[in-house]
């Protein structure tokens, strides 16, 4: 090995503690404060209580603990509802004040990335309409979807850099009687889980220390406007985002590394809906099989809508081709809810996941049949019209 | 048409789409270049290929973010047209290529190229988006990209028997969710206020988004216009 290579390996082995003064990018918040001072925008402040975290270049970011306006994800609510209910269940366990709005649209970014049948002004107006709706309630936006989170951060940059875009968006917002509001920070729910991880661990009821997990960090969380993602010198030496991994480690799960961690999941936005040969091939060949061969984890955990869907649903067809698959896929919020004893079906809604999750529950000593039977009784009662549906009163109580 | 040794003339642009006049290709190129976001997405290119090594689409398609950055930077009008006609819909929009040491955003360039292709109703783009119309219908009207009722076995056969099991139980499974805004909702991801949807429709009209839909699918445009205008008139 040459000295130069040794030097690089040595540097890489040391934890990175970046100096914000040497950050290669401008801190966009400074421009936001200037625009606010000029009266160009309204800036919604992060409410107290908040926790400060370190982002990629050593800057701090404030993550609100409560008084949050939950900007839901259409892919989570539509196809993985246990994702959303786990986020809310965690908030309810800690008696935190939050709002689940009906005055919310999705960011429509999935469609934009899939078909481009929109434009910059429309996308910015959709975002600001949602932010203005949050501002009107006094609650601070907490973004559930990784794509909404990345998309909104990119739009925020465009709004800051292009006055013409601001003017156009303001014209459209005027028609709706809404002001041009931006939040001081754009915060992803997994950042909230991250800052809550030790409190979650304090209330942990289910031992997860026998589990090995792999983490798939979501592209639109840490690749788009990369400087805003959470990094921590204690996690991967500060060289990859700490979000998700730090949460799993706090819950006692062994996080194992695998060589294709940087690869996307294969979602493709358009591909997952109408060209899934690409999605399946990529998800299986580059992610699931690699994890299986290198680590053979009990589960893989991620923090975005598309990643959970892609990695979970792509495994069925691959199994028919005798590929090495069979890794259950969960979000960090679902794992946290599981650790705190949430009902596997009323809250975590395992039945919406298609890769077999039963071995995972058996390994941690959960008699899933018992809870499934209980849930079947719920379904029977709903079918018979004896109850309208499951309520929080039935779901709040930890059962594991 | 693949390039062969006979048709390969290094340094000379080869027209793979001779049916389209050069002026038209140049017009489209300038539309991309004049987008205000363009200057944030391309600063030149080292030809280092780091974007390609990170790119999922480059592994499974004849597709390269490096070529896109290069063609745009060299202002190779012919090659840019090839990319618009043949390549842009292969991109997974994952933005792994933001790893670019030059600060480029090849995925963002693809977004701009796609917008131009859609705005101009290019034949290849209309063909690609044909099977996707029902998703556009949903997102424009409901403000949600996906909904439980889209999970049908004929649409997702490769997701296994789970989809059939789900669709047979959809109504009752949706009621068995403790979240108030989700419980029982099957045609959207969550309950959305009518006022919110009317505001969304106003955004689509005010920002020219409906004109974009018209370019790619007139039938879909007519359908959407009927519903939205009626809703907005009712107020
Ligand atoms: S955004 Fe497109 S070009 Fe960039 S890495 Fe992803 S698939 Fe490749
Ligand atoms: S990573 Fe950047 S500089 Fe390197 S080839 Fe790709 S676009 Fe060019």
Image (cartoon, grey):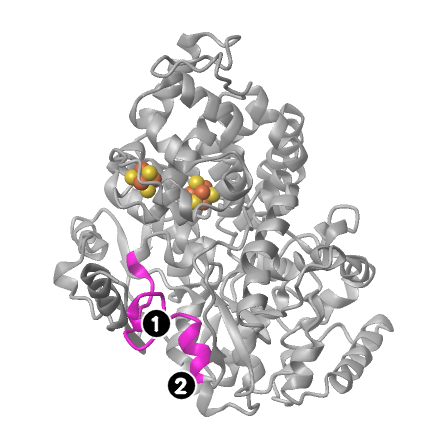
| Residue B88 to residue B26: above or below | below
| Residue A320 to residue B232: above or below | below
Residue range of the region highlighted in magenta in the rendering = A227-250
Task: Read off the chain for label 1.
Answer: A
> Which of the 4 image quadrants contains residue A245?
bottom left
Q: Residue furthest front?
A: A1
Location of mark 2 (residue)? A198
Q: Are marks 1 and 2 in contact (CB under 8 Å)?
A: no
Instruction: Report the Cα–Cα distance between label 1 and label 2.
Output: 19 Å
Look at the numbered disc 2 and give the secondary structure of its residue. helix
Magenta region includes residue A248: yes
Q: Estimate the x, y position of residue B172 in percent, counting from the top left.
A: 78, 67
The reply, left or right, for residue B127 in relation to residue B36 is: right
Residue lying at 68% horizontally and 72% vertically, measured from the top left: A350
Residue lying at 72% horizontally and 65% vertically, measured from the top left: B174
Look at the numbered disc 1 and give the secondary structure of its residue. helix
Location of mark 1 (residue)? A236
- Which image quarter is the C terminus of chain B in? top right
For the image shown, how many numbered marks are present on the structure? Answer: 2
* Residue in the foreground of this view, choosing between A204 and B217: A204
| Residue A355 to residue A374: above or below | above
Task: Read off the chain for label 2.
Answer: A
């Amino acid at each position: 090995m040459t000295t130069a290579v040794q030097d690089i390996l040595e540097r890489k082995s040391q934890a990175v503690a970046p100096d914000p003064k040497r950050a290669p990018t401008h801190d966009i918040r400074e421009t936001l404060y200037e625009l606010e001072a000029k009266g160009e925008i309204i800036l919604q402040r992060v409410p107290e209580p908040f926790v400060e975290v370190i982002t990629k270049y050593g800057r701090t970011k404030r993550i609100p603990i409560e008084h949050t306006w939950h900007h839901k994800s259409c892919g989570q609510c539509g196809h993985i509802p246990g994702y959303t209910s786990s986020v809310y269940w965690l908030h309810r366990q800690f008696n935190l004040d939050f709002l689940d709005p009906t005055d919310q649209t999705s960011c429509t970014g999935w469609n934009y990335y899939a078909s481009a049948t929109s434009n910059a002004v429309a996308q910015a107006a959709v975002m600001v309409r949602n932010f203005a709706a949050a501002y009107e309630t006094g609650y601070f936006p907490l973004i559930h979807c990784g794509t909404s989170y990345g998309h909104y951060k990119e739009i925020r940059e465009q709004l800051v850099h292009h006055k013409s875009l601001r003017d156009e968006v303001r014209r459209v917002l005027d028609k709706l009687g809404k002001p041009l509001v931006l939040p001081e920070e754009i915060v992803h729910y997994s950042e909230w889980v991250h800052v809550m991880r030790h409190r979650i661990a304090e209330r942990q009821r289910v031992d997860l220390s026998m589990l090995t997990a792999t983490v798939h960090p979501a592209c639109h969380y840490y690749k788009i406007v990369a400087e805003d993602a959470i990094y921590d010198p204690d996690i991967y030496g500060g060289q990859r985002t700490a979000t998700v991994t730090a949460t799993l480690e706090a819950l006692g799960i062994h996080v194992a590394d695998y060589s294709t961690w940087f690869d996307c999941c294969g979602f493709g936005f358009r591909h997952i809906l109408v060209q899934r040969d690409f999605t399946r091939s990529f998800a299986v060949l580059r992610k699931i099989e690699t994890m299986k061969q290198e680590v053979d984890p009990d589960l893989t955990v991620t923090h975005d809508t598309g990643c959970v869907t892609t990695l979970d649903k792509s495994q069925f067809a691959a199994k028919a081709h005798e590929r090495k698959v069979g890794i259950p896929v969960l979000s960090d919020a679902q794992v946290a809810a599981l650790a705190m004893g949430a009902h596997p079906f009323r809250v975590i809604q395992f039945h919406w996941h298609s890769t077999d999750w039963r071995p995972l529950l058996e390994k941690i000593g959960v008699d899933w049949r018992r809870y499934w039977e209980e849930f079947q009784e719920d379904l029977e009662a709903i079918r018979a019209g004896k109850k309208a549906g499951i309520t929080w009163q039935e779901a709040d109580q930890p059962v594991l | 048409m693949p390039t062969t040794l006979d048709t390969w003339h290094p340094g000379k642009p080869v027209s793979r789409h001779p049916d389209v006049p050069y002026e038209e290709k140049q017009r489209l190129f300038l539309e991309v270049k004049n987008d205000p976001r363009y200057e944030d997405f391309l600063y030149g290119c080292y030809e280092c290929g780091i974007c390609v090594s990170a790119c999922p689409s480059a592994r499974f398609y004849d597709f390269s973010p490096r070529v896109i950055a290069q063609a745009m930077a060299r202002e190779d009008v012919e090659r840019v047209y090839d990319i618009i006609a043949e390549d842009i819909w292969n991109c997974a929009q994952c933005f792994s290529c933001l790893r670019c040491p030059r600060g480029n955003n090849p995925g963002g360039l693809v977004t701009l190229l796609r917008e131009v292709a859609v705005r101009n109703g290019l034949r290849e783009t209309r063909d690609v988006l044909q099977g996707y119309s029902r998703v556009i219908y949903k997102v424009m009207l409901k403000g949600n990209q996906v909904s439980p009722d889209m999970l049908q076995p004929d649409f997702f056969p490769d997701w296994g028997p789970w989809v059939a099991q789900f669709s047979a139980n959809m109504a009752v499974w949706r009621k068995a969710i403790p979240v108030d805004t989700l419980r029982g909702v099957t045609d959207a991801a969550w309950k959305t206020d009518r006022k919110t949807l009317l505001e969304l429709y106003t955004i689509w009209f005010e920002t020219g988004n409906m004109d974009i839909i018209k370019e790619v699918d007139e039938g879909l445009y007519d359908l959407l216009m009927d519903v939205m205008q009626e809703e907005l008139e009712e107020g």
